[in-house]
């Protein structure tokens, strides 16, 4: 081994290849925030989450799994483009390729519109989405496709077999009417106030689910826990609550996941370290 190989690191990438161990998770970043409607800057989030990841403990006491001994490959960041359709197409194709290689994509946003691409690269999974917002608008500010409408598009195009929406509290009356009329499973903040019954409802729903894709919009958290997001909404989940929901996925079959909407410029470090913690626990669950 040369001194260069020995001493140089490839930071910020979080690739960790253990001798003889195949990686199950391929990480990639999507530095795209062109459809953000309030605060912008989530294009800088992928590297911020990687930096936080490198500075937290990655032994999961709860899951009894040591990520230090798990192979992870980081593919880097998607090429920067300004057009949502082009970004969605690239995300879809990369996601499809990762899954064809029998890996699980772990995608770091970017704004939430990337999920419109990644889901189209999967095989019609159950979508577990953590988000303050329903993202079921038919259009927003003249855009049919944006981070505020993508779930409506995925639903209309029949890309998802089932949706479990967790932490919801902010949407128009039209969106609430739409999800109620279409019988979409909502575990809203009122249900999470009583954590045990909220978790029970989630576990019950998971028992009849096949492959699961998890999408975490960090604004599902209360701004006290995650101030660095694009559209902060009061009265959200605590770190403890979201982690308890994540641990319910321990025996589920994950097909992919994403963590979106972090904006480092508005963060004091708590949002990125929580994003890194969620990434670590989800990799533990994916690599089982
Ligand atoms: Mn949101």
Image: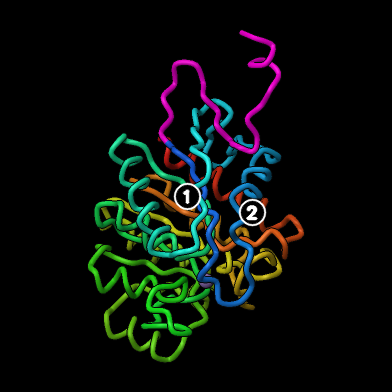
User: Residue shown at 59%/38% (left/top)?
Assistant: 61
79 or 268, nearer to the observer: 79
Residue 130 in the image: x percent, y percent? 48, 65
* Quarter in which the C terminus is drawn: top left
Say which residue label 2 marks.
274
176 or 249, nearer to the observer: 176
Circle 1: element type: strand
On screen, residue 288 above or below 216: above
8 in magenta: yes
Residue 260 visible (yes or no): yes
Callout 2 environment at 10 Å: few (<14), some (14 to 19), or many (20+)? many
Marks 1/2: CA–CA distance: 15 Å
Q: Nearer the viewer, mark 1 or mark 2?
A: 1
User: Residue shown at 49%/44% (left/top)?
Assistant: 28
47 or 209, nearer to the observer: 47
Residue 169 in the image: x percent, y percent? 51, 79
Callout 1 environment at 10 Å: few (<14), some (14 to 19), or many (20+)? many
Residue situated furthest right in the rendering: 268
Q: How is the image coloured?
A: rainbow
* Numbered label attached to residue 107: 1
User: Residue shown at 40%/82% (left/top)?
Assistant: 137
Helix, strand or loop for the magenta stretch, by majority: loop
Q: Quadrant for residue 103, please give it.
A: top left
* Quarter in which the N terminus is drawn: top right
Is 182 placed left or right of 225 in the picture? left
124 in magenta: no
Span shown in magenta: 1-24
Circle 2: element type: helix
* Numbered label attached to residue 260: none
């Amino acid at each position: 081994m040369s001194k260069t190989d020995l001493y140089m690191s490839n930071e910020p990438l979080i690739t960790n290849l253990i001798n003889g161990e195949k990686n199950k998770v391929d990480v990639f970043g999507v530095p795209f925030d062109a459809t953000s409607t309030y605060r912008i800057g989530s294009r800088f989030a992928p590297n911020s989450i990687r930096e936080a990841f490198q500075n937290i403990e990655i032994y999961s006491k709860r899951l009894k799994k040591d990520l230090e001994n798990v192979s992870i490959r980081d593919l880097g960041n998607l090429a920067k483009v300004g057009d949502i359709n082009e970004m969605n197409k690239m995300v879809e194709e990369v996601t499809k390729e990762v899954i064809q290689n029998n890996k699980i994509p772990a995608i770091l946003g970017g704004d939430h519109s990337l999920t419109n691409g990644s889901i189209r690269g999967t095989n019609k999974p159950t979508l577990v989405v953590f988000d303050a917002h329903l993202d079921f608008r038919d259009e927003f500010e003249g855009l049919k496709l944006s981070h505020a409408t993508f779930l409506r598009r995925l639903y209309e195009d029949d890309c998802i077999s089932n949706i479990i929406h967790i932490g919801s509290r902010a949407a128009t009356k039209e969106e609430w009417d739409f999800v109620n009329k279409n019988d979409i499973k909502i575990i809203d903040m009122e249900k999470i106030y009583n954590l045990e019954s909220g978790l029970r409802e989630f576990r019950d729903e998971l028992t009849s689910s096949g492959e699961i894709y998890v999408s975490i919009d960090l604004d599902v958290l209360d701004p006290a826990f995650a101030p660095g997001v694009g559209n902060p909404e009061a009265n959200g989940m605590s770190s403890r609550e979201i982690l308890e929901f994540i641990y319910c996925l321990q025996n589920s079959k994950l097909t992919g996941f994403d963590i979106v909407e972090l904006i480092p410029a508005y963060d004091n470090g708590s949002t990125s370290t929580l994003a890194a913690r969620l990434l670590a626990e989800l990799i533990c669950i994916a690599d089982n």
